[in-house]
Image (spheres, helix red, strand yellow):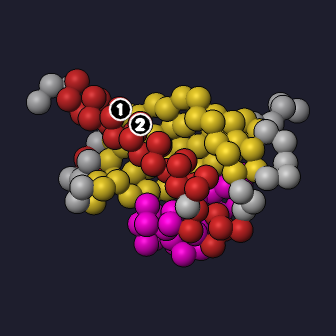
Amino acid sequence: MSLKDPIATSSKAGLDFAKIFYKTFDEKRHLLGNIYQDDAQVIWNGNPYVGKEAITKFYTSLPHSETNLLSVDAQPINTKFQEGKPTVLVTCAGDVRLKGLQNAGFTENFVVTAEGSTWKVLRGTFRFHEPAP
């Protein structure tokens, strides 16, 4: 297998994952738990949420959103990280408007791993873009 194969596979997986994630985030947020592993961890602007139930509860507490995804980058992670399973680091950036709030830029990172024919989130971090001090 050439080096291009895991990179091409990761790029496609990352883009496909991002499209599914943000469509679900905006339209069917209560289903986001299906995308996370049971013991997943998310850090949202410095606030940790552990386990897919806690993550889903947090996401469903947020106001309605409209996300404009501007860029997606995906890189393969060594398969030793997840006991031979394909694993990808997905980095997304865009703008999101939460109902009642101004449009805000964001960056979000996911570590996703293959479980059968789907990708599940192991870890995620979200950060609104804020001016530097």
Q: Residue at x 55, y 37 (%)?
A: 92
Q: Residue at 52% x, 55% y: name it.
A: 24
Residue 15's disc number:
2
Q: In the displayed image of the protein, which residue is found farthest to the bottom?
A: 53
The span from disc 2 to disc 1 (Cα, nearest Å) is: 6 Å
Position of the C terminus by quadrant: top right
- Residue 131 located left or right of residue 124: right
- The reply to whether the C-beta atoms of the residues labelled 2 and 1 are less than 8 Å apart is yes
Provide the secondary structure element on which disc 1 rests: helix
- The amino acid type, in three-letter code, at marker 2 is Leu
- Is 117 part of what is drawn in magenta? no
In the image, the segment drawn in magenta is 31-56
Image quarter of residue 95: top right
Q: Magenta stretch: residue 44 in it?
A: yes
Q: Residue furthest right?
A: 133
Residue 62, horizontal then vertical, whole percent: 72, 62
Q: What numbered label is drawn on residue 128?
A: none
Picture coordinates of residue 36 (x, y %)?
45, 63
Q: Which residue is mark 1?
A: 11
Residue at x-position 47% and y-position 42%: 19
- The image quarter containing residue 12 is top left
Along the line of sight, the residue nearer the viewer: 20 or 106: 20
User: Dividing the image into 4 quarters, which one contains the N terminus?
Assistant: top left
- Residue at left offset 46%, top offset 31%: 73
Query: Can residue 49 be seen in this snapshot?
Result: no
Above or below 10: residue 3: above
Q: Secondary structure under badge 2?
A: helix
Residue 16: x and y in percent read 39, 41
The answer to whether residue 37 is above or below residue 130 is below
Q: Is residue 95 left or right of residue 40?
A: right
Towards the viewer: 117 or 6: 117
